[in-house]
Image (spheres, helix red, strand yellow):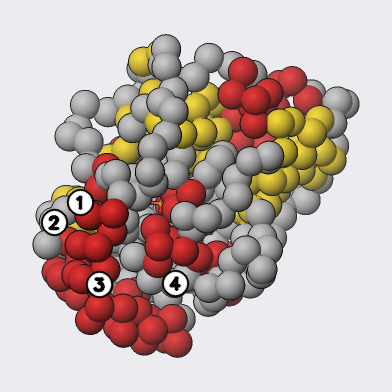
Amino acid sequence: MLIKKAADFRYSEITPKSVYLNRRKFLAAAPAALLAAREAFSPSGRAAAASLGGLAKSPFSTTEPVTSEQIVTHYNNFYEFGTSKDEPVKYAQNFKTSPWTVSVEGDVEKPRKLSMDEILKLAPLEERIYRHRCVEAWSIVVPWVGYSLSALLNQVKPTPKAKYVAFESFFSSKEMPHADGIPFPYVEGLRLDEAMHPLAMLCVGMYGDPLPPQDGAPVRMVLPWKYGFKSIKSLIRIKLVGGQPPTTWNIAAPSYYGFYSNVNPNVAPQHDQRMEARLPYPFRNHPTLMFNGYGDQVASLYAGMDLKKNY
Ligand code: MTE
């Protein structure tokens, strides 16, 4: 149902022409692929996963209806595993996410290389139900699992020189032969005060289970007030730095994708952002909210800034 109607989306709204032309090819084949995936796998597309127990509830959770796991795990943007929405679930299943380490380095007093075991134990795991808004104008509501990135940053103690946080995804052309469309490794960045905001989440799971590979296993960022492309997947490096770090989509198309990329219905460097399609509905059925509805929490981070210029 979803994929059939996905032709209504304007992929050209965010994506280079070569990429969206390839996507058209996939749309023709998608319904059969989706059916096959549904038969072969659990909702997340993997065989079975140990669930994450003892999750604390979060005051940051929305009470809006949660999007089905089937959609969230089969309609992905993860260009390391292909540029079409149905490719990550197919091509990421053998992605080796263990052992895994995340290096936290740069302008910090105590640089660390953390194993996944250490990351899982660093702070109590919470379930946070956040809205997730892609710049392509579709949105979902996801019960993520993790904790505030600030818990990790406070442990490494940023020095006064640290003003920004640079993030880097894992990349291997051998393990990711379908990677296409943008330069790799995928990199992202935040100002340090954005990264320290309690809503900025270091995420290790969803729907009570560890993250499936197509959603950024084993650890990713989730930044609910920003367009989805800021929420970098399969993190291997977090570096505290003095200057604004480069970001992948800004490198690929600087006039469309700014460093901040806060959800903003009034700013549309490329196309209209006033309405969004809350999946499974493929048509724009929801008004887009400033900061994706998280303005009460995050607007003060941008006080006095021209958000049209700093898009
Ligand atoms: N991270 C990496 N490493 N590679 C990507 O292609 N895509 C981004 C973001 N993080 C991407 C990434 C985009 S465009 C979006 S909308 C979200 O991941 C999608 O997350 P989801 O597939 O879990 O919904």
Q: CA distance from mark 3 to mark 2?
A: 17 Å
Kindly identify the residue that appears in the image at 68 percent across and 23 percent down: 118
- Identify the image quadrant of the N terminus: bottom left
Which secondary structure lies at badge 4? Answer: loop
Which is more toward the observer, 130 or 250? Answer: 130
Where is mark 3, residue-wise?
A: 30
The image shows residue 48, relative to residue 82, as above or below, that is above
Residue 194 seen anywhere in this rendered image of the structure: no
Amino acid bearing label 4: Thr
Measured Cα–Cα span from mark 4 to mark 2:
21 Å
- Judged by depth in the image, the label closer to the viewer, 4 or 3, is 3
Give the spatial CA distance, label 1 vs label 2.
Answer: 6 Å
Q: Amino acid at mark 2?
A: Tyr
Q: Residue 33: percent from the left, percent from the top?
A: 26, 68
Pointer 1 and pointer 2: residues touching (CB < 8 Å)? yes
* 147 vs 271, nearest the viewer: 147
Question: Nearer the viewer's eye, disc 4 or disc 2?
Answer: 4
Of residues 201 and 92, the one drawn nearer to the viewer in this rendering: 92
Q: Earlier in the sequence, mark 3 or mark 2?
A: 3
Q: Are marks 4 and 2 in contact (CB under 8 Å)?
A: no
The amino acid type, in three-letter code, at marker 3 is Ala
108 on left or right of 292: right
